[in-house]
Image (cartoon, rainbow, N blue to C red):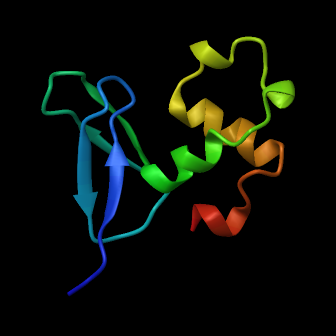
């Protein structure tokens, strides 16, 4: 059986599983949130380890993708993590 990966809706937290590993999946949410990037859950877990001192002032207002970019910039996520 192939391994599956979870992806999270940025609006409502709806989770879907896919058998492929990419940073995000663009899809429509079943909960009528619209068409958006579902981010892989393991990336979101790493994003939470960005030290508060390194977070921009608007951290709470950033979407999941923007937080991934901050984590990448701060060295919390590396390019191999995105593969």
Q: Is residue 53 above or below residue 46?
A: above
Q: Nearest the camera: 64 or 28? A: 64
- List x then y, in percent, for residue 12: 29, 25
Q: Is residue 38 left or right of residue 17?
A: right
Q: Which residue does the image show at 63% across and 64% down from the upper left? A: 81
Q: Which residue does the image show at 67% across and 69% down from the upper left? A: 80
Q: Is residue 62 left or right of residue 11?
A: right
Q: Which residue does the image show at 62% across and 49% down from the upper left? A: 46
Quarter of the image that includes the N terminus: bottom left
Residue 18 falls in which quadrant of the image? bottom left
- List x then y, in percent, for residue 32: 16, 22
Q: How many marks?
A: 0
Q: Nearest the camera: 30 or 60? A: 60
Residue 29 falls in which quadrant of the image? top left
Q: Which residue does the image show at 53% across and 44% down from the upper left? A: 44
- List x then y, in percent, for residue 31: 14, 26
- List x then y, in percent, for residue 68: 63, 41
Q: Is residue 41 above or below residue 14?
A: below
Q: Is residue 13 left or right of residue 78?
A: left
- Residue furthest bottom as drawn: 1
Quarter of the image that includes the C terminus: bottom right
Q: Is residue 80 above or below residue 78?
A: below
């Amino acid at each position: 059986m192939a391994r599956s990966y979870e992806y999270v809706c940025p609006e409502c937290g709806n989770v879907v599983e896919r058998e492929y590993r990419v940073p995000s999946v663009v899809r429509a949410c079943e909960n009528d949130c619209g068409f958006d990037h579902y981010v892989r859950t393991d990336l979101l877990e790493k994003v939470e380890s960005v030290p508060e001192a390194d977070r921009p002032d608007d951290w709470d207002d950033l979407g999941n993708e923007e937080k991934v970019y901050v984590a990448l910039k701060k060295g919390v996520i590396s390019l191999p993590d995105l593969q």
